[in-house]
């Protein structure tokens, strides 16, 4: 892998890491998991109504699929963070 591609991949991985830390902080700081998850669902709904990507990428089916996949992954992570584990 050339240096430029490696730097781009490292930058993206670092951004994802920091966003996951932010997600965890949000879940930890929020006392009402139902309200937090409802807010997340609303944010996803609003984001789906308008363009959140650059104009040149708006018609990319691959990008749309990746955005959907990441939204689903992050929703699952948020649920795990927001909903306390039940102990038997």
Image (cartoon, rainbow, N blue to C red):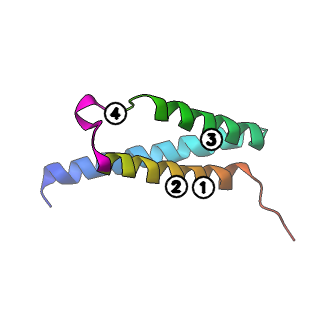
Report if the CB atoms under discs 3 and 4 are less than 8 Å apart: no
Report if the CB atoms under discs 2 and 3 are less than 8 Å apart: no
Tell me the mark number nearer the camera, choosing from 1 and 3: 1
Residue at 57%, 33% in the rendered image: 43
Residue corresponding to mark 1 = 76
Q: CA distance from mark 4 to mark 1?
A: 23 Å
Query: Which labelled disc corresponds to residue 73?
Result: 2
Judging depth in this view, the residue of 78 and 42 nearest the camera is: 42
Residue corresponding to mark 3 = 25
Q: How many neighbours does mark 4 have within 10 angstroms: few (below 14), some (14-19), or many (20 or more)? A: few
**Residue 40 placement, left or right of 31:** left
Residue corresponding to mark 4 = 53
Mark sitting earlier along the chain (3/4): 3
Secondary structure state at the residue bearing disc 2: helix
Mark sitting earlier along the chain (2/3): 3
Up/down of 76 relative to 33, above or below: below
Q: CA distance from mark 2 to mark 4?
A: 19 Å
Report if the CB atoms under discs 1 and 2 are less than 8 Å apart: yes
Residue at 61%, 46% in the rendered image: 24
Residue at 22%, 49% in the rendered image: 7
Specify the segment rendered in magenta: 53-61
Q: CA distance from mark 1 to mark 2?
A: 5 Å
Judging depth in this view, the residue of 15 and 72 nearest the camera is: 72
Mark sitting earlier along the chain (2/4): 4
Q: CA distance from mark 3 to mark 4?
A: 25 Å
Q: Whole-percent x and y of residue 13?
A: 36, 51
Q: Quadrant of the N terminus?
A: bottom left
Q: CA distance from mark 1 to mark 3?
A: 16 Å
Q: Whole-percent x and y of residue 51?
A: 38, 29
């Amino acid at each position: 892998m050339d240096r430029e591609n490696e730097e781009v991949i490292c930058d993206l991985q670092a951004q994802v890491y920091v966003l996951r830390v932010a997600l965890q902080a949000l879940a930890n700081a929020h006392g009402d998991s139902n309200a937090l998850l409802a807010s997340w669902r609303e944010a996803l709904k609003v984001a789906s109504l308008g363009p959140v990507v650059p104009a040149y990428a708006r018609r990319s089916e691959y990008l749309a699929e990746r955005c959907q996949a990441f939204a689903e992954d992050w929703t699952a992570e948020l649920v795990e963070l927001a909903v306390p584990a039940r102990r038997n």
